[in-house]
Image: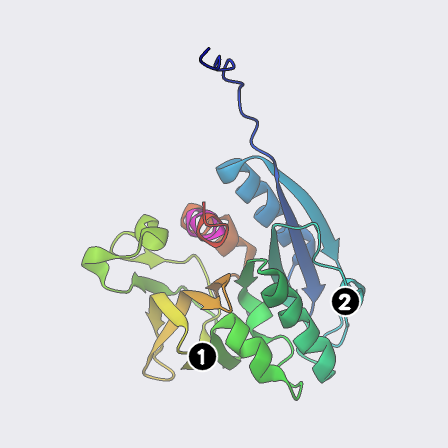
Amino acid sequence: MPAIEPDSQPTVTPKVRALLITGGCCHDYQNQKQIISEGLSKSIGNIDWTILQYGSGRDIKADIYQRGDWIKGFDIVIHNECFGGVEDGPFVTGIVNAHTESKTPAIMIHCSMHSYRNAPTADAWRSFLGVTSRRHEKSKHSLHVVPTDAGNAHPIVRSIGNAWDTPNGELYVIEKVWPSAKVLASVHSDETGNQEPVIWLNEIKGTRVFGISLGHHNETMLDKTWQAVVAAGFNWAMNQ
Ligand SMILES: [Zn+2]
């Protein structure tokens, strides 16, 4: 007798288990953690959030990273942290290795790019980010963001259209784009005379990393274009 096909069951998509690590110097992390998590939940839905906020010191070594299995149980980690004063090399490589050994994707926002820059192993962090940056422009102002290859922009930045003028901004100066990274959008800096990458993808050891250096001001994060780009970056990082 032919096997009887079971009735199809409604599929329940499991929630994405997302970890947001935030805190450190110079930014309004109290509100930004809400803006990021609520925005992504609204765009994507079905996210189970764990949010860890640390203090405002730039030399804080977030205790979660000191647990060997800290990344276990999470599908993605969003870093919106600003710990530029941490100089513990093994601590920094430990964060990177946790990602690459488990192939857990990451979203890196704004000051995460300047975190750990004084550690002797800072290049491990930078290779994971996909860029090297140590400073930002002196003045804060609206930034004119243009997609790479505007007529045929990557889907992640399609919400930008031909250009997006951020409400306010602090432009990071990018010294180097690592070979594994792909720049999706940039801003011309009058200060350096260069197009500074602001949105990019990186893939390292089979691990997806979405980077966005825009996000100093809450009003930038609240902008619908920032929200759309980060949601698209989240989906790319999750390979969904
Ligand atoms: Zn900033």
**Residue displayed at 62% across by 71% down:** 96
Give the answer, above or below, for where 12 lies relative to 59: above
Q: Mark 1 and mark 2: span between their CA atoms?
A: 26 Å
**Quadrant location, the C terminus:** top left
Instruction: Describe residue 91's horizontal placement relative to residue 148 as left or right.
Output: right
| Disc nearest the viewer among 1 and 2 | 2
Q: Main secondary structure of the magenta part?
A: helix
Q: Which residue is mark 1?
A: 173
Q: At numbered mark 2, what does the secondary structure look like: helix, strand or loop?
A: loop
Mark 2 is on which residue type? Ala
Which stretch appears magenta? 228-234
Q: Residue at x 71, y 55 (%)?
A: 72
Residue 180 x, y percent position in the rendering: 41, 73
The stretch drawn in magenta includes residue 67: no
Q: Nearer the viewer, residue 3 or 38?
A: 3
Q: Residue at x 35, y 58 (%)?
A: 165
35 with respect to 166 (left or right)? right
Q: Position of residue 74 (x, y in %)?
A: 66, 50
| Quarter assignment of residue 145 | bottom left
Residue type of the residue flagged with mark 1: Val
- Determine the image quadrant of residue 141: bottom left
| Residue 231, magenta (yes or no) | yes
Residue that numbered label 2 is attached to: 62
Query: Disc 2 beta carbon < 8 A from ligand 1?
Result: no
Quick check: is the Cβ at mark 1 less than 8 Å away from ligand 1?
no
Q: Are marks 1 and 2 in contact (CB under 8 Å)?
A: no
Q: Residue furthest bottom?
A: 120
Label 1: element kind: strand
Query: Which is nearer the N-term, disc 1 or disc 2?
Result: 2
Residue 82: where, in percent of width, then height? 65, 70
Identify which residue is drawn at 70% across, 83% down. 89
